[in-house]
Image: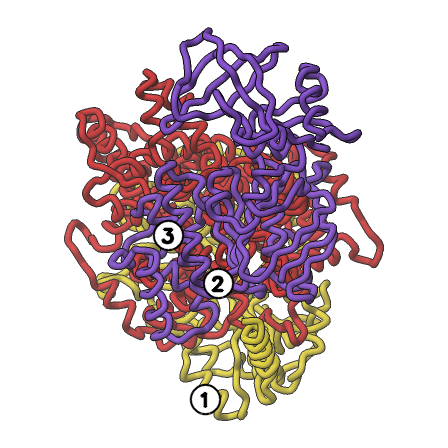
């Protein structure tokens, strides 16, 4: 549905996007995940038509939309700070786009009522938006951007300023809502948990280009580069400079290729006591520490050959300094090209 | 929005174009003090079938300047109100078309001119006004000449206007120049130095001097019982007094050489649309009705001999027999130098 | 604002630029051309004359000197008052603010009479002091001194500074200050380290406007200052009108415009980098609590009463009192057509004219001013120049521009020189800088995402302007509107260029009545001045009301 080809952009001398290409299918929710300053917001602004100085192509259903002005694109954008109009009530904020579209008064009233209901704000429509809580503001902003039924909705870190618990809850609600409305969406975030929860596909962005674009599962299980792995929060990532024992392990696993830059030992292939999958290699290790993470513990071991492994476990297996035996499934030793 | 803007613009332009000129109109350009009875103008319009449009162009100086600047596309057909202090500038600017009105026969000889670019209409004398009661209470005799004003006994009594910005102020300066000449020794500058030593007060304009400093005009807030004003001010004080029957409270000093006479002229503007109408209006200004109407409206005296004056003028106004005289050409040529020299004398 | 750059946005931006081009630059350049190229060849000898004698250099120095002193004095007095107005709620606050704005509409000659009545040698204050201390001389002798020029400038400009700073202060709020207090700041250090730096943009904005006003001061210097003092503006008037030395007048005008332009460029550079965030919800003023706070409010009220209201009261007293008793016959006489004169204008007619012009000028200035402010608000290299350009009408002598109108706007479709339209047009020129100065800081405080959100919801540039920017700028627009209205109500220079009956405004009637002989016309002028103040006060109340109603509707 939306196709970006070779889009580049710079703020003065600072390049923010480098020949970036991206495709979005109808009804899909695509997450742009990346550290701050990687060009996510710029990309959204270009798609929205707010940024005019760029090169490359943007097509919507095969039609070049570069000359179309922002207010004529029929896209929705939910801002990071929500950008609610402080002089309007919640109801009037939601009605704004409908009014611009020229809907009649009664229709607007009905639709706004519907939306207030759908986002769980029934009864709060008359409220001054500055008097709403963060979560309520987020819902008003969402309803406002969805109400005119945009062809494409973009969300710029919409849950960024909320507390973690609310964030998890709203991310789920958001996905349900978007899927129910069948809206194509691009969702910008720097929080991988949020991205996992909400996305059909995730595009990892760094330094103005897309590193990898795949389903959350695929991405998690097979990150293409060390950088992607690091950004997904995967530990046990080793470079060539690190301990030779790891490279030997990779060789044993048959993963090593000539262009390999990093070795990743995926956490699902690490276990204590007995291997999770065959073939696996067992190592003697020393238990270094356990960090309490709530449901899990982060376990850290020093292995023979003097290298370390970290993984999650339900229980603490031993006392600090005690010897343990750890197994690494060879299928989970990944050689990364980047 | 854009369309609406465009429509408004077109409308405005259309109105302006439509307004540009109605055919049977004569446009009278004049100064702010111009006033005349409405009925009189109505009768002129009825007699001639011409509509008169009055365009005010600031004070006399501003008006003449505007007329000169717009010489190639005149503001109107007739210009009234240029006086002898600005006449030379107007004539040098070649803004007038010559016209010899048949009504000139009736005008007093002293006002007639050799050229016919302008026609005299009225005159007024700038004189010192005094507070009658104050001089009686303080048992002080009235000054009989300008020279006497420098006498110690009149110290701190006189308010004048700045000749740079005020028409009566300039007239009074001209009177002193006519009296004392421009000689280095004993000339008008020495006289002003003496006035300054005698604590003369210089106000910016007539309003400020008369209502702010003059004991009568300011109703006690001011401290000066002598002020430069007009010979017609005493009858005006009576006419506008709360009790007109109480008689005069001020008088004018009209001894020979103490006053300066301002004559106001009218002329047809060169190259204007309605020359015929302009000439009719000039004739009308010399008619008996117009001449008789002026005194009470503008507090000036008619130039046509034998015009009947209103009762208050007959009773309270005096016309100086021998006002001071400075040639208009000299005024225009030396105005800046005189004023500059005056300012330096008063400030140094 | 960047979004306005789109196709129809350009058309919008053209409006104020066209307006300025046609009604300001074109007449101005035409008169300069006529003045400096009298015979077709450029003659710059007038500039030579300017530097050949000390006189004009001294005039320039005095002009700057008195303007700097007046501005300093105005800010010194207005800043603490602005703090009190923004911070505390007290009875009669908005009334006091309205009254403080009234001096702005009064013609200088009327103010001169009011000052004479109040602090003249035989004025109220001297009489009082003489009686109190049994003196045989007048203790206050300010007439025709630099002192009275400064007092008059403060009298005229206090409200500008007060309104701009109080409005800004209320919008930045007091959280920073409270934080500083917690860290131990107090007294003078609180002012020096926190408050003054915080309101620097408003301080500069207000200071700039006041400085320009005092720099181009005409009536105050001429009438109250007397012959010893002359500003450039006075010199320009004198050379243009009395001497008709157009080359010299043009040279002086150019010097004046260039000095102001240089100043404005420095100022706009200072101002551009400063942005504030609107406090999320308006800071709510509170009642004064401690004794010190009550004293501060009291001092502020006393200062305004003494400085601004007492001359107004003296004027009122002169208008209604005759020999110690109240006499309103002069008000009644205004309505009578006592003289069957052609040019007698009923006061009602003049009031209607004044209101008509003021409303027109206000609306035009608001429309053009808001668009111009958004043009300036764009972060472009040219923005600074636009800002300075729109300020220029304030720095241009009225007589120069007036002559420019006469020579430039004389042919259809711009045959405006004899049309009443020239009055609201010239008022709009002068009112524009006020609207811009009021609106721009607030506009800079609006996050750009609001406009972008509106745009993505389908708002065209003008819809965005009307539905988002305009209501958010409500308070500053109201202040701008009040100044635009006031400027137009009090201005009468332009009215003197045009002549039809429908162009006679209230200040013109005052001016004419003062020029007429007789005590009755003098009292009539005072009555008219009082009416002018009343009509203006009514206008303020109406505009304030309008704003509150307007906010609810959007």
* Protein chain holding label 3: A
Residue B27, can we see it?
Answer: no
Q: Quadrant of the C terminus of chain C?
A: bottom left
Towards the viewer: B211 or C155? C155
Query: Which residue is rendered at x = 56% and y = 72% of the image?
Result: B5
Give the label, 1 or 3, closer to the camera.
Answer: 3
Say if mark 1 contacts mark 2, CB within 8 Å. no
Query: Disc 2 marks which residue?
Result: A182
Q: Residues within 10 Å of mark 2 (few under 14, many from 20)?
A: some
The residue under label 3 is A139
Residue ID at (20%, 53%): C321
In the rendered structure, the answer to whether residue C315 lies left or right of residue A156 reads left
Is label 3 or label 2 in front?
Answer: 2
**Residue B43 numbered mark, or none:** 1
Alpha-carbon distance for marks 1 and 3? 78 Å
- Left or right of C522 on screen, residue C484: right
Dot 2 falls on a residue whose secondary structure is: loop
Q: Chain of mark 2?
A: A
Q: Looking at this view, name the residue that lies furthest to the right.
A: C41
Chain appearing in yellow on the rendered image: B
At x 23% / y 35%, what residue is drawn? Answer: C127
Point out residue C224 in the picture as x, y percentages from the top left corner: 43, 41
Q: Quadrant of residue B143?
A: top left
Which of the chains bears the disc numbered 1? Answer: B
Circle nearer the N terminus (3, 2): 3
Q: CA distance from mark 3 to mark 2?
A: 18 Å
Q: Could you tell whether A155 is left or right of B316 in the image?
A: right
Q: What is the drawing colour of chain A?
A: purple
Label 1, label 2: how far apart the Cα atoms are: 84 Å
């Amino acid at each position: 549905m939306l196709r970006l080809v070779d889009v580049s952009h710079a703020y003065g001398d600072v390049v923010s996007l480098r020949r970036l290409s991206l495709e979005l299918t109808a009804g899909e929710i695509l997450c742009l995940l990346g550290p701050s300053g990687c060009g996510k917001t710029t990309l959204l602004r270009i798609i929205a038509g707010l940024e005019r100085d760029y090169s490359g192509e943007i097509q919507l259903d095969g039609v070049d939309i570069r000359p179309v002005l922002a207010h004529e694109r029929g896209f929705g954008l939910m801002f990071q700070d929500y950008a609610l109009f402080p002089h309007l009530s919640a109801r009037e904020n939601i009605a704004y786009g409908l009014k611009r579209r020229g809907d009649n008064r009664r229709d607007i009233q009905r639709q706004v009522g519907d939306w207030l209901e759908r986002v769980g704000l029934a009864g709060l429509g008359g409220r001054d938006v500055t008097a709403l809580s963060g979560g309520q503001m987020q819902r008003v902003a969402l309803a406002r951007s969805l109400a005119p039924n945009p062809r494409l909705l973009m969300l710029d870190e919409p849950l960024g300023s909320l507390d973690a618990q609310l964030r998890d809850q709203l991310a789920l609600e958001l996905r349900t809502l978007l899927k129910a409305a069948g809206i194509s969406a691009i969702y910008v975030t720097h929080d991988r948990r949020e991205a996992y929860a909400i996305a059909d596909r995730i595009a990892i962005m760094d330094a103005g280009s897309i590193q990898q674009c795949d389903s959350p599962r695929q991405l998690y299980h097979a990150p293409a580069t060390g950088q992607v792995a690091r950004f997904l929060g995967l530990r046990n990532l080793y470079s060539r400079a690190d301990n030779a024992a790891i490279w030997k392990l990779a060789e044993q696993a048959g993963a090593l290729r000539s262009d390999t830059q990093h070795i990743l030992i995926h956490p699902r292939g690490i276990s204590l006591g007995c291997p999770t999958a065959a073939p696996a290699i067992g190592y003697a290790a020393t238990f270094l520490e356990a960090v309490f993470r709530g449901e899990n513990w982060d376990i850290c071991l020093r292995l023979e050959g003097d290298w370390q492994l970290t993984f999650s476990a339900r229980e603490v297996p031993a006392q600090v300094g005690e010897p343990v035996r750890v197994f690494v499934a060879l299928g989970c030793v990944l050689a990364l090209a980047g | 929005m854009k369309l609406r803007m465009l429509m408004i613009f077109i409308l405005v332009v259309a109105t302006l174009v439509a307004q540009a000129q109605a055919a049977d109109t004569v446009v009278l350009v004049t100064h702010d003090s111009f006033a005349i009875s409405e009925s009189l103008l109505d009768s002129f319009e009825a007699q001639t079938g011409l509509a008169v449009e009055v365009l005010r162009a600031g004070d006399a100086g501003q008006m003449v300047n505007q007329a000169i600047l717009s010489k190639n596309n005149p503001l109107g057909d007739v210009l009234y109100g240029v006086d002898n202090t600005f006449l030379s500038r107007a004539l040098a600017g070649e803004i007038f078309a010559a016209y010899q009105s048949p009504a000139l026969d009736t005008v007093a000889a002293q006002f007639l001119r050799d050229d016919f670019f302008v026609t005299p209409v009225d005159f007024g004398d700038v004189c010192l006004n005094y507070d009658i009661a104050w001089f009686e209470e303080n048992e002080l005799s009235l000054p009989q000449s300008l020279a006497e004003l420098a006498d110690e006994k009149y110290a701190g009594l006189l308010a004048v206007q700045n000749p740079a910005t005020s028409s009566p102020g300039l007239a009074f300066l001209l009177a002193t120049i006519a009296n004392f000449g421009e000689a280095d020794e004993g000339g008008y500058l020495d006289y002003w130095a003496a006035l300054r030593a005698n604590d003369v007060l210089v106000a910016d304009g007539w309003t400020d001097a008369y209502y702010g400093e003059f004991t009568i005009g300011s109703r006690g807030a001011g401290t000066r019982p002598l002020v430069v004003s007009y010979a017609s001010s005493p009858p005006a004080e009576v006419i506008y007094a709360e009790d007109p029957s109480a008689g005069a409270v001020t008088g004018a000093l009209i001894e020979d050489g103490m006053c300066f006479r301002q004559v106001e002229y009218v002329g047809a503007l060169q190259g204007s649309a309605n020359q015929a109408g302009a000439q009719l209006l000039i004739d009308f200004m010399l008619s008996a009705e117009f001449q008789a109407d002026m005194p009470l409206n503008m507090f000036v005296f008619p130039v046509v001999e034998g015009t009947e004056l209103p009762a208050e003028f007959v009773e309270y106004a005096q016309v100086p027999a021998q006002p001071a005289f400075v040639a208009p050409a000299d005024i225009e040529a030396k105005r800046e130098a005189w004023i500059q020299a005056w300012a330096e004398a008063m400030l140094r | 604002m960047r979004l306005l750059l789109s196709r129809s946005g350009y058309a919008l931006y053209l409006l104020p630029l066209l307006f300025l081009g046609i009604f300001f630059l074109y007449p101005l350049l035409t008169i300069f051309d006529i003045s400096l190229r009298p015979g077709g060849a450029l003659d710059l000898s007038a500039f030579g004359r300017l530097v050949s004698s000390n006189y004009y250099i001294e005039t320039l120095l005095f002009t700057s000197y008195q303007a700097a002193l007046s501005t300093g004095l105005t800010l010194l007095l207005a800043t603490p008052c602005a703090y009190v107005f923004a911070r505390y709620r007290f009875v009669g606050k908005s009334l006091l603010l309205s009254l403080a704005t009234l001096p702005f509409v009064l013609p200088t000659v009327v103010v001169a009479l009011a000052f004479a009545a109040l602090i003249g040698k035989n004025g109220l204050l001297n009489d009082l002091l003489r009686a109190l201390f049994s003196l045989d001389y007048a203790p206050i002798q300010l007439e025709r001194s630099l002192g009275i020029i400064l007092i008059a400038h403060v009298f005229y400009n206090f409200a500008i500074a007060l309104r701009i700073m109080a409005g800004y202060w209320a919008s930045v709020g007091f959280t920073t200050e409270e934080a500083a207090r917690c860290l131990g700041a107090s007294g003078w250090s609180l002012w020096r380290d926190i408050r003054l730096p915080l309101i620097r943009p408003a301080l500069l904005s207000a200071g700039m406007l006041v400085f320009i006003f005092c720099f181009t001061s005409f009536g105050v210097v001429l009438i109250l200052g007397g012959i010893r003092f002359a500003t450039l503006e006075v010199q320009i008037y004198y050379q243009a009108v009395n001497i008709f030395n157009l080359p010299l007048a043009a040279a002086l005008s150019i010097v004046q415009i260039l000095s102001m332009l240089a100043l404005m460029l420095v100022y706009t550079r200072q101002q551009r980098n400063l942005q504030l965030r609107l406090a999320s919800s308006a800071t709510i003023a509170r009642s004064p609590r401690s004794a010190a706070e009550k004293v501060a409010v009291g001092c502020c009220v006393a200062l305004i009463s003494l400085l601004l209201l007492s001359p107004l009261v003296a004027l009122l007293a002169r208008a209604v009192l005759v020999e110690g008793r109240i006499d309103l016959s002069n008000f009644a006489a205004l309505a009578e057509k006592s003289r069957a004169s052609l040019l007698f204008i009923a006061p009602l007619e003049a009031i209607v004219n004044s209101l008509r012009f003021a409303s027109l000028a206000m609306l035009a200035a608001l429309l053009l001013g808001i668009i111009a402010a958004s043009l300036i608000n764009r972060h472009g290299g040219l923005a600074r120049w636009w800002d300075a350009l729109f300020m220029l009408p304030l720095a241009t002598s009225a007589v120069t521009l007036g002559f420019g109108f006469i020579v430039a706007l004389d042919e259809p479709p711009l045959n405006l020189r004899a049309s009443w339209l020239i009055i609201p047009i010239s008022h709009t020129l002068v009112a524009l800088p006020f609207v811009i100065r009021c609106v721009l800081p607030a506009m800079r405080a609006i996050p750009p995402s609001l406009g972008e959100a509106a745009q993505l919801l389908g708002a065209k540039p003008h819809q965005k302007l009307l539905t988002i920017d305009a209501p958010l700028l409500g308070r500053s627009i109201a202040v701008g509107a009040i100044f635009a209205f006031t400027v137009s109500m009090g201005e009468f220079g332009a009215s003197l260029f045009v002549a039809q009956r429908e162009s006679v405004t209230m200040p013109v009637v005052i001016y004419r009545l003062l020029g007429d002989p007789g005590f009755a016309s003098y009292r009539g002028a005072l009555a008219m001045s009082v009416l002018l103040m009343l009509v203006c006060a009514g206008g303020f109340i109406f505009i304030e009301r309008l704003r509150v109603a307007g906010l609810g509707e959007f």
